[in-house]
Image (cartoon, helix red, strand yellow):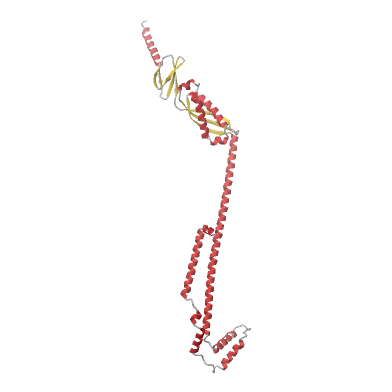
Amino acid sequence: MDDLIPILAFLAIVVTLAVVISGVKIVQPYEQAIYMRLGKYIRVLNQGLNMVCPLINNVVKLDLRTQVLDVPSQEVITRDNSPVNVDAIIYIKVTDPKNAFFEVTDYRMATIYLAQTTLRSVVGEMELDDILSNRERINLQLRDILDENTDKWGVKVENVEIRELDPAKRVKEAMEEQTSSERKRRAAILQADGLKRAAILEAEGKKKSRILEAEGLRQSMILEAEGKRLAVILEGQGDAQRLRIMSVGAAALDSKAMAVLSMETLKSVGEGESTKFFFPIELTKIVEGVSQYLGNAATIPERSIADIKDIQSGLGDPDAILGPIPKVEEIRKQMENIDKLMDAEIQQTNSLAQNPRTVENQE
């Protein structure tokens, strides 16, 4: 009997320690616990060491960190009858451990099932093109709906992300054909626009080229006409000066000089190779003058210098008759002025070639 006393004492100590330990609950910093005793809710245990009634307590710990829930992929029929496989990811966080434990059996599975039905409802009201282009709007709509419905469970939905939108195979093929057709259409439009622009630029280039060519032709014709005019003027002045000089020189000639000149003219005609000669009607007068000169040369007195001066004084001042005779320096100066005019015209043509808009404005 005495041998059993140490054993019983040891067992009593072990039982006492077990009872004391069952009344000690340690809650981690990221957790909160629901404390129940004999099937009755007592309170929420916070982080750290908590003492509860031993043996008759029930403590359930809940994680308060953000949890990631995977919504399984499901096939959804859109409003335009296009089947599409959709799955999502939900980020939730327990904000009220009491409601998360007492208001729903399993808040994780409940949130996933609610997300599936909500996702099917939201996507089913949209067309496929809107779904593919408005993921952000779908995410926000799902988050608002889920957060409103899970609020009574003490769960906050922080974010919802559509992970994959996978249309059916036949829908993909139709979309690829549509995309290919759209790209071909855009390529055809771009090619047509390029051809249009090229034709416009080519026409504008031809127009400007013709304008410049016409302007150059006009300038060249002006310069050519100016040169011809100056040449005609100079030639006419030369002929006029020659005739004036001949008239001044012929004023001092008498009948004997005229007879000698007529004989020289007949001599030059006779020296030609032609066998036919044409003489003017006044030939008899010329022969008569020659015979008179040959027969009466001794009786005709020679003209004196005074007689010649009288004849010249009767004709007038030779300088007045001849008029201004252009000098070499004056002709050279006129040619320089013409060169300067041509250089100015060439510079104007070059400036018009560099700035064709000026020609268009002038037109």
On the image, which quarter does residue 85 sit in? top right
Rendered image quadrant of residue 28: top left
- The residue drawn where x is 50% and y is 62% is 348
Extreme right residue here?
276
* Residue 305 percent across, percent down from the top left: 48, 89
Q: Is residue 211 above or below residue 241?
A: above
How far across and how far down the image is residue 158, in percent? 47, 29
The residue that appears at 58% across and 90% down in the rendered structure is 290
98 over 315 or under it: above or below: above
Q: Residue 76: x percent and y percent? A: 57, 30
Q: Could one spot residue 162 in this view of the protein?
A: no
User: Considering the image in quadrants, where does the C terminus appear?
Assistant: bottom right
Question: Furthest-top residue in view?
Answer: 1
Find residue 205 and report its horizontal and vertical position in percent.
Answer: 55, 56
Taking 345 as reference, is 6 left or right? left
Q: Is residue 196 visible?
A: yes
Q: Residue at x 54, y 69 (%)?
A: 225
